[in-house]
Image (cartoon, helix red, strand yellow):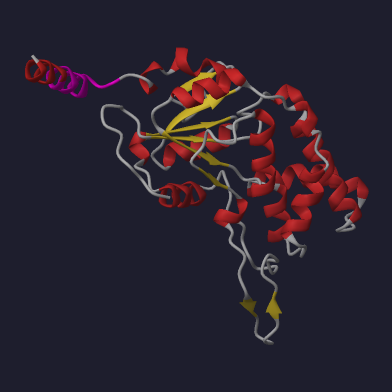
Amino acid sequence: MDAHRIDGVKYECLLFDIDDTLYPLSLGLNLACRKNIQEYMLEHLHIEESEVPKMCLDLYIEHGTTMAGLKALGYEFDNDEFHAYVHGRLPYEKLKPDSVLRNLLLSMPQRKIIFTNSDHKHAVEVLNRLGLEDCFEGIICFETLNPPNIDVSDDNHVTESGRFNSHTQILCKPSVEAFEAAIRIANVDPKKTIFFDDSTRNIASAKVAGLHTVMVGRSDLVPGANHALNSIHNIREALPEIWEVEEDSQQQMIQSLAVEAIVLA
């Protein structure tokens, strides 16, 4: 992604998670997603029903996402089919256009980029439903961090692109490596970038990667968080510096306007 300097502002880029960050957890998409994952594990991977709930949670905790954990254990399945099953049946109709958030985002002078563990199709669907599809410069998602590749094993068997072999490690939040990759892809200075997320683990890793961090969905600070917002709608009250012009730049602007006024006179 192309970087460009924004004169006069403290921060040059804003990275946003999507799910339970740009819309509230109370809408229930998170629970619906977990239910779909567990059904996939049961119906497609044939994991014992009694083991599925605990296994789903344990893999999420250990690997960042249940999908990453299943791959690490050696389960082989098509990534696109998994995402289509898990996200394709979500109750997207619960998401409504958010004009308040849209106006806030459009008023921010910084670059704005999505950084999510989800697949691209899901990210686009959510943004479209919220009416925010044109508020972001780009989307860093599952496919960005885990591009399909062609893998040749010892017996010269070619693994299809889009399908990971059992030895492939999925790169995703909350690993610090995922944040470092996102920083490189977005071509940003982490010291001048703010990251918004609803996950305490993601916030902690983002801080390790050098980002300024905002916890969304709760009012108390968690380890690694610089700010906490009950709602994404509270950005302006909590972080007015996003809109503030730095003093030096403001002085230069005043001087420039003064010179222009003299010339015109």
Closer to the camera, 95 or 193? 95
**In terms of depth relative to the viewer, which is nearer, 188 or 56?**
188
Please tell me which residue lies in front, 14 or 67.
14
The quarter of the rendered structure image containing the C terminus is top left
Residue 257 horizontal side relative to residue 227, left or right:
left
Residue drawn at x 39%, y 32% is 110
Image coords of residue 94 (percent x, y): 78, 26
- Residue 137 appears at what percent x and percent y? 48, 41
Residue 2 painted magenta: no
Q: Where is residue 17 in the image (x, y as percent from the top left)?
A: 57, 36
Relative side of 56 to 105, left or right = right
Determine the residue located farthest toward the front in the rendered image.
265
Quadrant of res 159: bottom right
Which residue is at 56% across, 17% downward?
A: 233
Q: In this view, does 91 lie to the left or right of 135?
A: right
Residues drawn in magenta: 245-256
Q: Give whichever of 124, 58 is nearer the camera.
A: 124
Residue at the spot x=80%, y=38% of the render? 90
User: Which SS does the magenta portion mostly show?
Assistant: helix
Vertical relation: 241 (above or below) 93: above
Q: Outermost residue toward the bottom?
A: 155
Q: Where is residue 260 in the image (x, y as percent from the top left)?
A: 12, 20
Residue at image coords 72%, 48%: 66
- From this view, report whether residue 194 is shown above or below residue 245: below
Q: Is residue 253 rendered magenta in the image?
A: yes
